[in-house]
Amino acid sequence: MFYIRYEYLSESYPRFRVYKWREHEQVLPYVLHESFSDVVRQSEMYPKYQHFFMLDESRFGFFRFDVFETRTEKFTLQDLKDIIDEKTKSTKKQHNVNGERIMAYVDTIYVNGEEKKYVIGETGEIFFRLYIMYLDKKSINTINSTYGNFFDVKNITFIPQSFHTLLFLRNSLKKDNFVLLYINETFCKAINVKNGFYESVETLNLGLSALKQMYKDNGIVQYWYKEFDVIESNPLAKSLVTDTLQFYSQLFCKRLQEKNFVGNDVIVISPITKNVHFIDIFNKEYKKINNNYIVPFHHSELLETFDRDRDPDDMDALILMNREEYIKRELGLLAVE
């Protein structure tokens, strides 16, 4: 049994999309118009649940290291802990990190030039990538005001919203470099993924509200939710819709260029991915400045949707739910064996 709380960061209008999942029941989604501190306090009322907080990436710091080691004796868990601690100290000192480490993990492991799944127990020339994530001090203080020291609490987990989506796409697409583009009602969040990890995160003021205003300015707001065939059947409406989307896409490409986010495939997670005209026009504009693609991400055959058609806004939480279901099945199989 678990709760997932997905944050929509806003000082003036804080809210969380919540997913409650009890065993043998469907996922129950709802929205809480509460502050982060209030939602943390509510989680303490349900100690039997596992609580996942999917927080905005602006609360986190991200660092990646390429580690080279030559070992004549077997590489141990203590060796790994020592490297993580050393990198943590140097990172906090060099980058003045205002927060605490909440996660460290390794992948892309090679031993004597051969790819490996694990680094523990290996000898020889060892290479791996080490990833470290920090949660900022302000968020930690908010959490600790309820839990004391949340590092001692086993049933709560704090992760960036896009973390498992990033890993899912990296592993399923076999691509280490791409851009995740979240377009919501008020703004757009662009995440540059390089070598399979966070390179940079930017916020662009080009949310769906800006596009809706363009529809209003062109007198076509009634076509906002129309199906593809309805728009196609009206030449004037189609012309106005495509012109509006083209202008919006040109602005997007300009902003992406300004932030140096151009040069990789862009994966869009947004309700606007249902608009076939938008994806087509956005692709054409993006193609004018590079040879990569704009790809909508609103479903995958690799994901269980738990008996419900999921909105694009649900993708991050859906991937986390699939991960938890997989872990539960694996633990069940291990218990049987």
Image (spheres, rainbow, N blue to C red):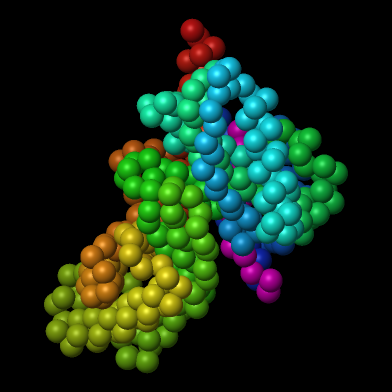
Q: Is residue 147 above or below residue 9?
A: above
Please state the horizontal and vertical placement of residue 296, each as a whole percent of the image.
32, 59
Please state the horizontal and vertical placement of residue 324, each as a whole percent of the image.
52, 34
Q: Is residue 12 above or below residue 27?
A: below
What residue do we see at 35% from left, 85% from top?
A: 215
Is residue 243 shown left or right of residue 8? Answer: left
- Looking at the rendered image, the quarter that the N terminus falls into is top right
| 7 within the magenta span | yes
Out of 51 and 173, give the one closest to the viewer.
Answer: 173
Taking the image as drawn, is residue 110 in sight?
Answer: yes
Q: How many marks are shown on the rendered structure?
A: 0
State the residue lying farthest toward the top: 337
Taking the image as drawn, is residue 19 in sight?
Answer: no
What residue do we see at 77% from left, 42% from top?
A: 150
Out of 7 and 264, give the one closest to the viewer.
Answer: 264
What residue do we see at 67% from left, 31% from top?
A: 81
What residue do we see at 70% from left, 61% from top?
A: 34
Please state the horizontal and vertical placement of residue 274, each as a whole percent of the image.
31, 63
Please state the horizontal and vertical placement of residue 202, each as a whole percent of the image.
52, 68
Occupied quadrant, residue 265: bottom left
The region drawn magenta spans 1-12
Q: Is residue 131 above or below residue 191?
A: above
Out of 299 and 123, give the one closest to the viewer.
Answer: 123
| 228 within the magenta span | no
Occupied quadrant, residue 219: bottom left
